Structures are given as C-alpha cells and as structure tokens.
Image: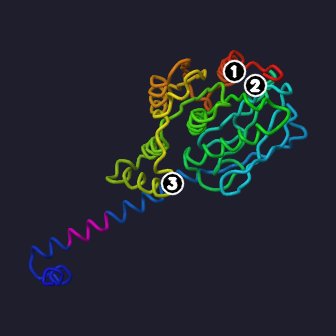
Amino acid sequence: MAVLSELRYPRTRLAKVFSGFLALLLFAIISVSTISGFLLYQILRPARTPASFDLSVMMGHPVTFSFTVAGGAQREGWLFPGLRGAPTVVVCHGYQSQRADVLTLVTALQDHQFNVFLFDFAGHGTSMGLTSLGYRETDELRAAVQALSTRDDVDPQNFGLWGVDMGGYAALEVAETDPRIKALAVDDAYDDPRAMLQIEVKKSGLNSLPGVLRFTDFGFRMMNYSYRNELPVSARLGSTRGIPKLFVQADDRAALSDETLRLFSKAPDPKQTLRERLSYRDMTDDDRKSYESQIVNFFLQNIPPTAGH
C-alpha cells in the first residue's frame, strides 16, 4: 500500500522520476495503439470508387449472377458467356481494386470462348464492409465457384482461377481444397494475409514508430479471430500436385514478388513462372495486351474451352 501511495503522491525524487517514466510510457502506448488502430482501419477499408456499367450495352453480353456468401450476404457478379458447357475462368481482382479494373483480361478470355466470371470482394467496388486481405475473400470465392457449378450452361467440374495479390491468395486457397479447379494463375500472390498487412504498414512509413507493426498485427488477428487456425498457403501447396500453375512476379512490387517466388519454389509440379516489369494495374496498354495473351494461352493449354470439357 505504501508503494502505491508513493506512486500516486510521489514525494521522493526517485518516486517522481519513476512516476514520470510510467506516465510517459502509458502515453506512448496509448499514442502508438491509437495510430496503429487508425492505420489498420485505413488498410482494411480502402477507398471505394464503384464503377457503374450498363450491362445491356457492354461488349460480351454479360449477365448478372448473384450468389450467397457466409452470413447470408449477397454478392453480385458478372458472367461473360463463352461456349456453352465450356470451363469457367473466375477472375479475382486485387487489393484496392475492383472487377471493372480487370475487364480487358475478361474480354481476352471470352474471345477464346471461355465462360468468365468476376465480382467485387468485400470492401471493394460495389461490395460494402471491410476487407480481410484474403481470409473472408477465400470464402467468397469458394461460394462463387459452388454457385456457378449449379448452372447448366457451364462445365460444373472444370474451373480456372486467375487472381492478383489478395485475389491470388484466395485463388490458391480455393485451389488447394476444391477438386474442380483445374488450372491456376496467380500474380503477386502471398502466403498469408498477415504478410500483406505488413507490406501495407511498411508502405505507409509508420512502421518506423516502435510497436506499430506489432499493434496492427495484433488488431488484425483479433478482427479475424475466427481464422486464427488458418494455415499459410504454403502449408497445403502439396495438394495442388497435378494442377497446372502459373506464378507471375512484378519487378515493381519487390516484397510481393519475393512472396510469389517463395510460393513458386514450394509448389509441386506442374508449374511455371513469368516475370513482368510492371504490376498488372500499372502496365501500359501494349504490356497489358502481351500479358493477357500469355494468361489466355496458359488456360487454353490446360482447360481448352470445348463443350462438355
């Protein structure tokens, strides 16, 4: 009791110094945790600028297709029809992106008679909420594949997945557990959503403050506590043996490029890698056309769009 009294009402010089140190320490912890919380919120709620399109005049004659995700929420996607009964390629946009940003790839795939589906992940485009950088997005993608497999105009047992960063993580996760995935292309993918969080924290520059990385990671884990036992992608990559895989690295996203290279090195055959100078969203029109041609050729070689594949 005497010690507590001395801390509350310090009389000696040592007690005053110690009390001042504790006050500064408490202030620092509160400040860092506040900054970390604000930063985490910004990362998990990226700016949304939903693109509006009139499907009736859009090339490719897409149709709206809705499906239910965990918790009963609805996701609305666009299905671009190809050859009836042919495989479907689900195109998964990345972090701070939306389905409208990958329409040129969709068109390139549809031009070669693939059925192509795309939608906005949570917290992006037209979908409300917070992103989880891959955890819930995996569930959303899995629900989309399941819903698409019930249609009578697509091959219910043959799907291809393409995804960039967050979409690439989700695509890898689904491919590891769903036997209907027969070909997989991922661009700047990562092993764990926590790795993407760290990349974004470092990009902000606030990681130089002591404790910010630790506080943001802790907050992220608490927000996604239901996924606490989720293993990294690399832990189950062995289950993709026999599935053709293409890993794409972009030189201008060094941290993600390194993540993708590590995944490639751990992945079983068949696999191949492709290196690009720029990330997909920053490519020039000519670079993007060349890139998309390589993606289309990968799927043509592995899940050719024939009726009743």
Q: Residue at x 47, y 33 (%)?
A: 234
Q: Secondary structure at mark 1?
A: helix
- The residue under label 2 is which amino acid type? Leu
Does the segment drawn in magenta span residue 46?
no
Q: Is residue 306 left or right of residue 120?
A: right
- The residue under label 3 is which amino acid type? Asn
Closer to the chain start, of discs 1 and 2, is 2
Q: Residue 91 has which mark?
A: none
Task: Give yes or no for contact between labels 3 and 1 (Cβ–Cβ under 8 Å).
Answer: no
Q: Residues within 10 Å of mark 1 (few under 14, many from 20)?
A: many
Q: Residue 224 has which mark?
A: 3
Q: Residue 148: x, y in percent? A: 77, 38
Q: Residue 199: x, y in percent? A: 45, 41
User: Which of labels 2 and 3 is toward the front?
Assistant: 3
* Most common SS among magenta residues: helix
Q: Which residues are magenta?
A: 20-28
Residue tagged 1:
299
Residue tagged 2:
109
Q: Residues within 10 Å of mark 3 (few under 14, many from 20)?
A: few
Q: Residues within 10 Å of mark 2 (few under 14, many from 20)?
A: many
Quadrant position of the N terminus in the picture: bottom left
Q: Residue at x 49, y 45 (%)?
A: 230
